[in-house]
Amino acid sequence: MPLNDDDFMRYSRHLLMDDIGEVGQQRLSDARVLIVGLGGLGCPVALYLAAAGVGQIGLCDPDHVDITNLQRQVLYRTDDCGRLKVDCAKQALEALNPGIVVSVFPREIGSEILADRYDLVVDCTDNLEARQIMNRACYSQEIPFVSAAAVVWEGQLVAFDFGHFRSLCFDCIIDHNSAEPMMNCANSGVVGPVLGIMGSMQATTVIRLLLGYFEQHGEMTRYDGKRGQWLSIHCNRNLDCPTCGSASD
Amino acid sequence: MINLLFFGRLGDLAKDAPTCIASLEPDTTPLGIRQMMKADHPELSKALSEPQVLVSVNKMIVKWDEPLFEGDELAFLPPVTGG
Ligand SMILES: [Zn+2]
């Protein structure tokens, strides 16, 4: 949909920027983004992308809001406990920005949801199996995949622009036969704003990808909130990768 | 000499661990360094043996059997998988 008068006011702080402007805002408005996982990462990602005017947002999560979520999952209110996260999130996002369309999938991620032609998938889940499903679907559909994770004081971000790069994917970095590590947020805890930082970086990365400003395919960023340290590392393609190993470039 | 970096919570377990290896034996690998830690730093060594721990040399992810060379910076990154 073309931008209307209200949009020109709502998005004025984007329209002021030469490298976003009307053309960039229209690109955001035309975009379809799937957010998988509506926990500590998914909440800030969904809020920022809805506020930024990403036109169609899919939300996938089978869980209900629990009181132990409220320390970090900033989309939900105490009264939401017991409700489906996707329903609470849809309501909050549409109140924030009535000009966008939000669809909900209250179940585990599966290939039938991913088959519905998104422009980009954001991984806000907490397990390897879901990441592998998303990575493979994004690779085969040649769409970008933006993955993040966090535990205790630490965060990780890695994004893949599969529309432009056909080698190096999530399966190259984390062996597809790996067991889950012992520490997770449920048994070890996590600092809320660390999820906010990583989720905000994911949302920024989504906007960069949609506007064509992303050149860090497969580069991993690590954050240690306890010491205030960042680390960026490069990853190599794995020629034995079950997903991209046979790619020629 | 090679420098060692134990990122994130590995740093909590590596407080008394060396920050460098002064004289490098030929064919030393990240796996070899992990095994060296076993006697004096058992908790650190155990954490390094967890699934999905990543190793990087000079800011590039490598395999555990990658040979190390004089001047390398070896970093160990603990798994981060929650969301
Ligand atoms: Zn791969």
Image (cartoon, rainbow, N blue to C red):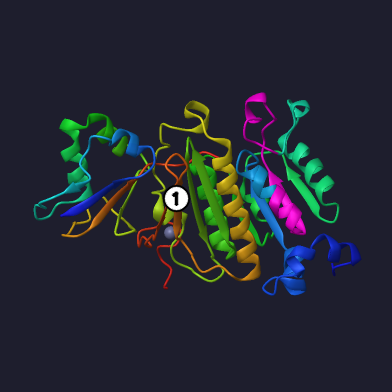
Q: Is A59 contained in the magenta span?
A: yes
As displayed, is residue B63 above or below residue B7? below
As displayed, is residue A191 above or below residue B58? above
Classify residue A116 by image quadrant.
Answer: bottom right
Start-end of magenta stretch: A47-74
Is residue A127 or residue B78 the one in the foreground?
B78
Which residue shows up at 66% across the image and 30% down it?
A70
Quadrant in the picture for the C terminus of chain A: bottom left
* Image side of residue A36 versus residue A57, left or right: left
Classify residue B44 by image quadrant.
Answer: top left
* Image side of residue B39 versus residue A10, left or right: left
Q: Amino acid at mark 1?
A: Arg
Mark 1, residue position: A222
Which residue shows up at 55% across the image and 67% down it?
A214
Q: Position of residue A200 (x, y in %)?
A: 61, 51
Q: Is A7 contained in the magenta span?
A: no
Q: Do we see residue A125 in this rendering?
A: no
